[in-house]
Amino acid sequence: MLPLIVTADGQVTLTPELMLHLGIPAGGTLVVEALPDGSVKLGGNGPANTLDAFFTLLDGTPRRATPLGIDEINHLTAAGWAGRLSDD
């Protein structure tokens, strides 16, 4: 369980890891559902299964700043089939 501190104004700060897990960007909306047992259910307001979420799944950092273009993909594919790819 992750403890969060509530300020005197009733504000709670979410950790970056929790925001990533919930799929909430900075300035995004958090959906809260009050459950009958006194607990709450938190969720992001939007699709959690985005391409960005996939690429940051393992450690939270994007693998590439810009996506590959079709020419780069074709070049890498040809080099891979020819055995000319390095590990970096």
Image: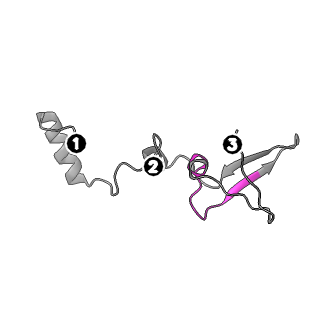
Q: Of the two numbered discs 3 and 2 on the same chain, state the one appearing first in sequence.
A: 3
Quick check: 29 above or below 73? below
Q: Is residue 40 left or right of residue 24?
A: right
Q: Is residue 60 left or right of residue 77?
A: right
The residue tagged 2 is 51
Q: CA distance from mark 2 to mark 1?
A: 23 Å
Q: Of the two numbered discs 3 and 1 on the same chain, state the one appearing first in sequence.
A: 3
Q: Tag 2: Cα neighbours inside 10 Å, few (<14), some, or many (≥20)? A: few
Choose mark 3 or mark 2, whichever is in front. Answer: 3
Residue 37 lies in the magenta stretch = no
What's the amino acid at mark 3?
Answer: Leu
Quick check: 72 above or below 85? below
What's the amino acid at mark 1?
Answer: Asp
Residue range of the region highlighted in magenta in the rendering = 19-32
Q: Tag 1: Cα neighbours inside 10 Å, few (<14), some, or many (≥20)? A: few
Q: Of the two numbered discs 2 and 1 on the same chain, state the one appearing first in sequence.
A: 2
What's the amino acid at mark 2?
Answer: Leu
Choose mark 2 or mark 1, whichever is in front. Answer: 1
Choose mark 3 or mark 1, whichever is in front. Answer: 3
Q: Which residue does the image show at 56% across and 49% down from the upper left?
A: 20
Asked if the residues shown at circle 3 and circle 1 are in contact, with their CB atoms under 8 angstroms apart, the answer is: no
Q: CA distance from mark 3 to mark 2?
A: 27 Å
Quick check: 65 above or below 74? below
| Mark seen at residue 7 | none
The residue tagged 3 is 2
Determine the secondary structure under disc 1: loop
Q: Tag 3: Cα neighbours inside 10 Å, few (<14), some, or many (≥20)? A: few
Determine the secondary structure under disc 3: loop
In percent of width and height, residue 35 lies at: 84, 44
Q: Which residue does the image show at 77% across and 61% down from the upper left?
A: 7
The residue tagged 1 is 88
